[in-house]
Amino acid sequence: MADRDDELAPSKTAGFKVGEKKTVEEYQRLDENDDSLNRWKASLGLGTGESISDPSDPRKCIIKSLALEVEGRPDIAVDLSAPGAVDTLKSKPFTIKEGSVFRIKATFLVQHEVLSGLKYIQVVKRKGVRVSKDEEMLGSYPPNTTDKPVYEKKFNQEEAPSGMIARGHYNAVSKFVDDDDVTHLKFEWAFTIAKDW
């Protein structure tokens, strides 16, 4: 299991240090008279709407769903908030047409405090051999409010491999992690590259 955890370790930028933790209220009071900073805070949604954080749920980030978007086709969506949904991902592979251009879309909720540097990391293997490792920076987010009840982030577009050698079954392990190395969701899943959908 340690090897799998090492494979999913986020890349580190030399010299980067995570900033001091602040509450939403501290960010709101930060340089209150600085117009450009106030515009930046407004763009983050700081100070707008009522908090929707659930005091009985200690999680800072809740991944609600993932979807595979392909132009001209209905999304392949997975509701991760449904009971047992994460556990069935590995046993129910989905099909991706070879050579198709797609993107992943994540929907998530942030609560209690600012989430700094959320990343998505994925390792794909075929027959036990690693074929790719991808890392996508999703950004930093304040807690959701009634004005912004959920976040949606579309990843960069990708192209599925094609050709006889590329077709077949793949296994993947993915996780959502932040700058504090807190893992918010880790799951195994599977897919098949095929000639057609």
Image (spheres, rainbow, N blue to C red):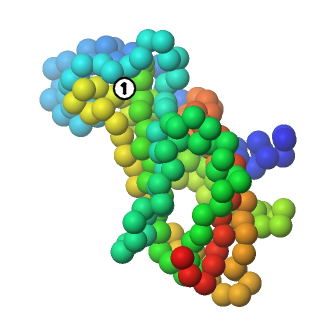
Q: Vertically, is 111 above or below 185?
A: above
Residue at horizontal 79 percent and vertical 46 percent from the top: 4
Q: Nearer the viewer, residue 48 or 126?
A: 126
Residue type at tag 1? Pro
In which quadrant will I find the C terminus?
bottom right
Query: Would residue 4 be visible to someone looking at this image?
Result: yes
Name the image quarter holding residue 160: bottom right
**Which quadrant of the rendered structure holds the N terminus?**
top right
Foreground pick, 80 / 20: 80
Q: Position of residue 90 (x, y in %)?
A: 70, 52
Between 39 and 104, the one nearer to me in the picture = 104
Q: Image quadrant of residue 42?
A: top left
Which SS class for mark 1?
loop
Viewer can see residue 137: no
Q: Position of residue 145 (x, y in %)?
A: 28, 26
- Residue at image coords 26%, 15%: 29
Q: Residues within 10 Å of mark 1 (few under 14, many from 20)?
A: many
The residue nearer to you, when weighing 149 against 115, is 149
Q: Can you give x and y, in whole percent of width and height, for residue 148 in the image?
A: 27, 33
Q: Residue at x 74, y 84 (%)?
A: 165
The total of numbered circles placed on residues is: 1
The residue indicated by pointer 1 is 143
Residue at 40% across, 71% down: 73
| Quadrant housing residue 69 | bottom left
Q: Indicate whether 195 appears above or below 148.
A: below
* Residue 14 in picture, x, y percent from top left: 62, 43
